[in-house]
Amino acid sequence: MNAYPGATGARLPRWLLPQDWPMHGDHPVLATLHFREDGTHIEPDRDVSGYLALNGALVLPPLIEPHAHLDKTFTVQRSPALQPGLLAAIAAMHQDRARWSADDLRQRARQALNWAVEAGVGLLRTHIDWFSADAPLAWQIVGEMQHPLCTLERVALAPLTFFADADQAEHIAAQVAASGALLGGFIHSSNWDAQAFTHLLQAAERWRLDIDLHIDEELSHDAQGLRWLARYLQHHPFSGRITCSHGCALAQQEDGEAILDVLAQHRVTLIALPLTNLLLQDAVPGRTPRQRGLTLIKEAQTRGMPVLLGADNVQDAFCPVGSYDPLDTLFSGLLSAQLGAAFDEASALICQRAALHDGATLLANDFVIFPAAEAASWPLRSRHRYRLKQGICYGESTNDA
Ligand SMILES: [Zn+2]
């Protein structure tokens, strides 16, 4: 297969272009992309023979699914939650996991990965529940999975109580380090333990692990996770990358923005999960929810914090719907968090790799092309898409079949 050396007529989002890029009214002029060894070079559009003609198609870097649960996905049919809310979903998941054989896990996780890649995802981070201090079967099964178009990352999701014992925290971190994965944890008012959190952070530091926490996924003013983390970091700078997922409580706390000030100084990444937060927060039977449950997305952006949007659970007891399409996640975020210009600004929330990895190249020779879409309607009317990686087109078909 011949690879294109470049592409013409690419409509890139405003956030991806240099400040002095020429504009045509409100829209950036189209770009020509040159695929070079050190990444893609861009310039205002011109004709180049032998280049792929994109004719104004919308173009983004590969999408990111920064927060998924491939071990739980596609189980809602057999194990729905019996009550609304987060804790009932956790109970349903524990019932379902008796059925998590290697074949069952492999089949469900593979379906999820395929759906994500069809949607244009090039990096998928999945949390995997640990039920004891030893890695679960799903850790190994997902660790064996690969896809040529998608990097798969694992995060060990252990309840905070597992870190109460320092030796056990060490044991978990050692296994995570041996797997080249990230350390995570579920930190919530229902299991709050400052000592255990200290052990988690110390073990991560010793094993040079990045961490990604489920933290303050609740609307309680008294949630202690992020407040305590901010105080801890002021005295114990952390050498790795810290990502905090959910952080719903920040929106309820009077000191929420002060907490963000500190987290921003320590370049903590914030991941908002609008779909599950809208569904699981402020959930009471027979009553319309009054609160959105979202973290302080705009305040974090204002402070220069890296922010991404993730899907979280897909078709399990936590969230019975979902598609592994980051455009669906973004659409829910656009409305619930009032995010502004979808393509030219908010699209950064589903494709900025540097939010998860220091030094990640924004313009590697890898793109998602939306050939029939236009910026005014995107992310709606944008199902049709394909990948253009190293000048080769993959998956030129619709994924809405
Ligand atoms: Zn999650």
Image: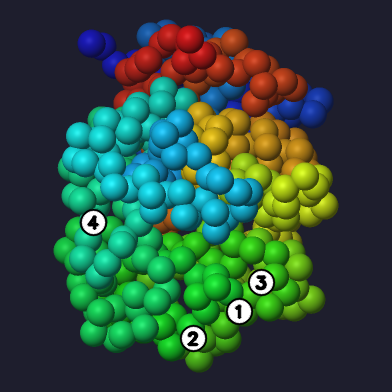
Specify few, some or many for label 1: CA neighbours under 10 Å numbering under 14, 14-19, or 20 or more.
some
Residue at 54%, 36% in the rendered image: 320
- For label 3, being within 8 Å of ligand 1 is answered no
Q: Which mark is residue 194?
A: 2
Looking at marks 1 and 2 on the same chain, the residue that comes earlier in the sequence is marked by: 2
Q: Crowding at label 4, few (<14), some or many (≥20) Cα neighbours within 10 Å? A: some
Query: In the displayed structure, does residue 306 sit left or right of residue 358?
Result: right
Asked which secondary structure carries label 4, the reply is loop
Q: Amino acid at mark 4?
A: Pro
Circle 1 SS class: loop
| Secondary structure of the residue carrying numbered label 2 | helix
Q: Amino acid at mark 2?
A: Ala
Q: Nearer the viewer, mark 1 or mark 3?
A: 1
In three-dimensional space, the C-alpha distance between marks 2 and 4, rounded to whole angstroms, equals 25 Å
Q: Is residue 122 above or below residue 238?
A: above
User: Of the residues under marks 1 and 3, which one precedes in the sequence?
Assistant: 1
Mark number for residue 136? 4
Residue at 59 percent across and 62 percent down: it is 217
Residue 224: numbered disc: 1
Mark 3 highlights which residue? Answer: 260
